[in-house]
Amino acid sequence: METKSSSSSTNLVDQSVCPGDVILDLSNMTNQTIKLGGGLRQDCDAISVMKAGRLRFSKPNKYWVENSQKRYVPHAEDSVLGIVVDSRSDNFLVDIKGPALAFLPVLAFEGGTRRNIPRFEIGTLIYARVVKANPGMNPELACTDASGKAAEFGALKDGYMFECTTGLSRMLLSSPTCPVLDALGKKLSFEIAVGLNGRVWVSAASPQTTIVVANAIMNSETLSGAQQRIMVEKLLERIH
Amino acid sequence: MEYVSPEGLRLDGRRPMEMRQIRAEIGAVSKADGSAIFEMGNTKVIAAVYGPREVQNRNQQISSHALVRCEYSMANFSTGDRMRKPKGDRRSTEISLVIRQTMEACILTHLLPRSQIDIYVQVLQADGGTRSACINAATLALADAGIPMRDLVTSCSAGYLNSTPLLDLNYVEDSAGGPDVTLGILPKLDKVTLLQMDSKLPIDILENVMQLAIEGCKAIANYIREVLLENTKQLEYRRGV
């Protein structure tokens, strides 16, 4: 059922909002279904904001607050970059920059059986998918896609990992391709893995290329598309 | 000593209902999850927030909600006389507790069970109203860290000297020995999260002083909102969204 949002909400969509702002009054909305995303909560007859950011609306009835932060709140089906911090008999403990360590079961790999359990040293970087993310329990990861195939998931060898905000990682994964990656990809050859938890892994043939790509991405957070392209050109001028 | 002149001016030239100039800056500490600097006149405070993260001491872990920890300290150079013990004394412990309880009232801790949020506040320059400035700085830092909050918490002090209610006391007025009310509110929800008073005050005057402090809190809330909105807009504008 399509939501006819109240005037206050219509005014606030695509606007910056703060904690405590009321975006919808449910008392004058009858028989309407709305879906609340991150950063919003229902408080009696009001939908209020709990994180500072920009209010977004997606037809027919989804509202959420888009914000950028350094910590990651786990959500199911997110692709994340985790660091193995401990190894147990039936699972690995992985740091995904969240409120709690995540569990990666030893069988959550393609063709995972008791006979071919992977061995990860502490400190290994892993690209994984969040399978379960309930508030009361540790998140659960898997190194397979929904169909059980390894796809791009697994341990990441070599390369360089750096941290950024969750907003920047979303921007890097956005469609159409982020201008900074587009500009770098035309001139340089490199591999990149972006986790929605604000971690980015870059691997290239030479350390020089790796550093250029990493610096370009880190600098791009506060730049517009045109500025990103100019910045990449200037960086490439220095190395060629 | 005369704290309010016959012309109605205070020692620093302000009117009784006038606040000191306030300034805030978000993202002062790059390594923290959220940070802010907050200035009220000559009082300058820096706050850093880390979390929500794994609880370091498993014995303190709470299964139903997040553990909020707070540490208040004053820099050695924050006052005229060099401070011998900038943290760990009774006053610092009490203010840490006050800030923690005030912030817990606004943080939606039940959304982050079995995790820990650390708030570190340091006074860089002290000139009265440090706990108010600390609460305001902590609010900004929490919002910057993206921690879910019911509302912004803002705080302001008010006093009563020379039979005049005064808003936002500086150090000289604060140490005059008169009544000093520190108030913390959730401005959108119209709820009080902190109310402290030194000395005695008749109930009818207390209401006037409290009303003055509430107005001060609301003015600070408007400024903090502007800072947060400007910060969000700037990021979006720069990205060309």
Image (cartoon, coloured by chain):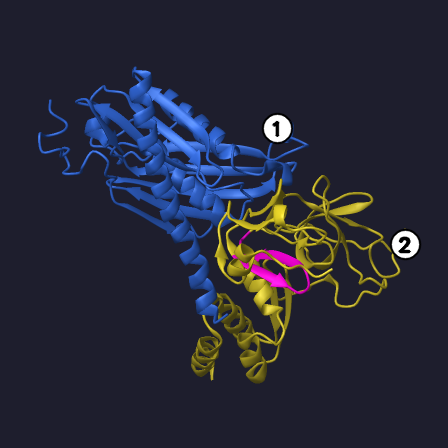
Circles 1, 2 touching at the beta carbon (< 8 Å): no
Q: Position of residue B68 (x, y in %)?
A: 54, 33
Determine which quarter of the picture holds residue B212: top left
The answer to whether residue A65 is magenta is yes
Disc ID at residue B68:
none
Callout count: 2
Q: Name the residue under label 2.
A: A113
**Which residues lie in the magenta part?**
A54-70
Seen in the picture, residue B224 relative to B106 is either above or below; the reply is: below
Colour of the chain lettered B: blue
Amino acid at circle 1: Gln
Q: Position of residue B170 (x, y in %)?
A: 23, 32
Which chain is displayed in yellow in the rendered image? A
Say whether residue B184 is left or right of residue A41: left
Amino acid at circle 2: Thr
B96 and B177: which is toward the camera? B177
Q: Mark 1 points at which residue?
A: B60
Say whether residue A135 is left or right of residue A201: right
Q: Position of residue B199 (x, y in %)?
A: 29, 16
The answer to whether residue B120 is magenta is no
Seen in the picture, residue B91 relative to A62 is either above or below; the reply is: above
Chain letter of mark 2 equals: A
Secondary structure at badge 2 equals loop
Say whether residue A53 is left or right of residue A145: left
Q: Which of marks 1 and 2 is in front?
A: 1
